[in-house]
Structures are given as structure tokens and as C-alpha cells.
Image (cartoon, rainbow, N blue to C red):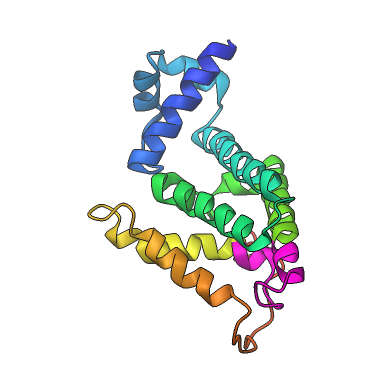
Amino acid sequence: MVRNRRLLLDAATAAFAECGVDVSMGEIAQRAGLAKGTVFRHFASKEDLLAAIMLQLLDRLTSTADRLVDADDAAAALHEFMTAGVEVLAADRAFCEVIGRPSLQLAQVRSAIERLGQTAETLTARAREQGTIRDDVTGMDIVLLLGGIHQTAAPLLDAQPQVWRRYLELTFDGLRATNARSLPHPPSRRLPTAESD
């Protein structure tokens, strides 16, 4: 039972990352080497399966941030977190496509997003306190910028899979405290969801 669930999650993660969220449950079952009915015994719908994958990715990013929270160089830690975040997005088409879908409204997913935002704020606050990034940048700014960097690079990724690193560096330079001008708009306090659109 646990083995089948793991096989399905691994197969679905690879399929969604490669092809996006339009992959059929039948194809996922085939990739996992299991019957289609087995997929539905573990996941009642594609949205449930997407939610389980989102939880894995969000937990991975939160674990990365947690690991970096006590680093001596808070700016380097923030940069490492952002690198890990954009790398996940660049390698996984489904992660961005799932934004706004019903799976994002599930309590577990929303809770995982909140945890990620809180940990990103802790990382960001330490960099602000060390004076290495601008004092008006928030953890939510950082989380939202991950998607922005990916979307900027997305049209080029097929031909240049690492081009996102260029836009990450441009963005990170804009976060630095040196010669920073005041931002013209207050920060967002939460990530957008289908409910708030």
C-alpha cells in the first residue's frame, strides 16, 4: 500500500514536471506500472494528487529554508534559498501551473504555503538585520519573486535550461541594501489564491 503510493507519487511528480498538469491519470498509472484503479484508490482525483505533490515540493523548500536559518551569512543563506526555489520551478512545469487550481485551496496545502512564507520571512529578517538587503523587503516578497524569476526565464528554458540563474542574480542585486531607493508600493502580506482572485 505504502509502496504503491510512493510509486504513484514518483511517477506523477516526473510526469507533471515534464509535461505539466494535463497528464492523464491513466498515463500516471502506466508510468508507475500500476492499474488505473490503484491511482484512484490512493487519490480520489487529480487535484488530490497535485496537492500531494505540491506538499512534497513546499516541504522541500521549507526544509531548505529551515536548514539555512542559522547561517552566519544571512544574505548568502537567502540567496541559496532563492536558488533552490527557482531551481524547483525551472525543473517542474506543474508547480507554476497548479497556482490557482482547486488543490491550492486544500487546508494542508494552504498551511504548507503559510509555513514556507514564515520561514522565508525569518531568513529575510536576518538578512535585513545584518544590513545586507534593503530594509523594506519581506519574506513574502522573496516567495513571490521566485515565481517572477521563473516566469521571466520560462520562454528560454527549453533552449537555455540555466538562463534563470541570470535573472536570479539581477533580482538579488536589486535586493541589496546599497543605494536602494524606497519601494513605491507596500508589500503583499500573503500569496494570491484562487479564492482571492
Percent x, y for residue 94?
44, 45
Q: Which residue does the image show at 70% across and 78% down from the upper left?
A: 136
In screen coordinates, is 161 left or right of 42? left
Q: Quadrant of residue 27?
A: top left
Percent x, y for residue 28?
39, 26
Residue nearest the viewer, comparing 129 with 44: 129
Residue 93 counted in the magenta span: no
Residue nearest the viewer, comparing 105 with 175: 175
Q: For the image shown, how many numbered marks are present on the structure?
A: 0
Q: Which residue does the image show at 58% across and 36% down from the upper left?
A: 56
Q: Is residue 180 above or below residue 105?
A: below
| Range of magenta residues | 124-142
Question: What quarter of the picture does the C terminus occupy?
Answer: bottom right
Residue 128 counted in the magenta span: yes
Percent x, y for residue 186?
69, 81
Q: Which residue does the image show at 57% across and 64% down from the upper left?
A: 144
Residue nearest the viewer, comparing 22 with 72: 72
Q: Quadrant of residue 53?
A: top right
